[in-house]
Image (cartoon, rainbow, N blue to C red):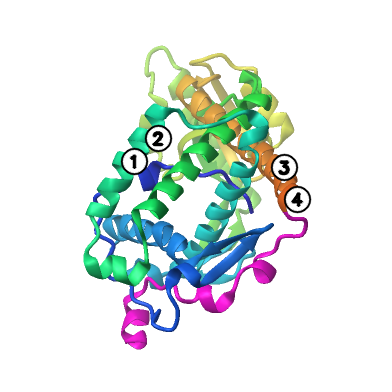
Amino acid sequence: MQRMKTWGVILLSAGMLVLGGCKADLSAEPTEKVEVFTIGEESVYLNEVWVYAKTIQQEYEKNYGTGIWTVELQNEDGEAQTVETITKEDIIEEILQVKVLNHKAESFGIALTQEETSQIQQQAEAFMNGLTDADIAETGVTLELAMQVYEENAIASKVYDRVMQQGSVEVSDEQCRQTKVYDLYFPTYIEQGEGDFIALTEEQKATQYNTVTDAYNRIMSDEDSLNIETAAYEYGCTNSDFHTMSYNEYVEQYGQELTDQIYAMSDGDILGVVESPYGYHVFQMVALTDAEATQDKKLEMEAELKQEYFAEVFDEYLRDVEHGWKFSKNVDEDAWNLIQFAPEAVETQE
């Protein structure tokens, strides 16, 4: 559940956004008295949640349009939820993480400098200047509250950085190596429809084998040399393509024996004619180690490991603040339902 956001990126870059278009019936009680959820001994009220919710609303609608909120996606449990519902849950998790990390700030000796506080003051003032009187009346947001949210995000970011400095997240070059080959592919089946495959007869396979052998000989010939990609075009191999994968992915795709043959090649080498469960192949090694793809994979793997590490640390921190925190237990559903983004919800409310 827990994942560290890039704290402050949305909030601290959205100072001039006009927070409009999100209505809720708040006449019964001021937003600063509507408790949305608790964490330990601390209560988080609706006006504070509005600061996050409105800012994220504007960011999403700028990028995806106002219709984004009713789009249905699968959540982590495979259940269909609207973007609005998923986003609202994410907002609670985001605030929860900020609050928990702020609880750990003192133990790390973390505090904001005078310069950072001055910058936050300016950002909070710019944020408030972007609100209309109606916005302020609706949300109950004040300069002091905006300052608090900005300060807590800044502190949470510092604590997160300190936590991640303590964790050793390393990925070796071999772990993330990406190998690029070109697969000139001659299938030994016929696809009659989606998911409907019929194996070639032995006679048809023999004909296919002769064809791939002819292509391979032309590729390897000194007199009538044929580029492997050109061969795919000339022989009608429409499923031939470049593949950039890890060693394990090649094993999964082609099997152990064929993968070992592929990895025995050097850049530029040709392997053929070889057979897999799918048909006949001629492989050309483009790059045993594709530098760019390997670097991208390394960053991806490091990000995943960092996320896993932080999740473990955060769960421990959360237990220190409140053991057994649960969305269903700690969040007031009626207050949470007051946060609405979808235009349809606005019209119904009115």
Q: Are marks 4 and 3 in contact (CB under 8 Å)?
A: no
How far apart are the two marked residues, 1 and 4, measured between alpha carbons?
Answer: 32 Å
Type of residue at label 3? Answer: Glu
- Residue 166 shown left or right of residue 346 in the figure: right
Q: CA distance from mark 3 to mark 1?
A: 34 Å
Q: Is residue 24 left or right of residue 3?
A: left
Judging by the rendered image, the residue that carries numbered circle 2 is 117
- Residue range corresponding to the magenta coloring: 322-350
Of label 1 and label 4, which has the lower sequence position? 1
Residue at image mark 1: 121
Assess whether mark 4 and mark 1 are in contact (beta carbons under 8 angstroms): no
Residue 212 x %, y %: 51, 34
Q: In the image, residue 328 lies at what x, y percent?
A: 67, 71
Q: Are marks 4 and 2 in contact (CB under 8 Å)?
A: no
Residue 56 occupies which quadrant of the picture? bottom left
Q: Measured along the vertical axis of the image, is residue 302 above or below residue 35? A: above
- Amino acid carrying label 2: it is Thr
Residue 319 is tagged as: 4
In the picture, the quarter occupied by the C terminus is bottom left
Residue 194 visible: no
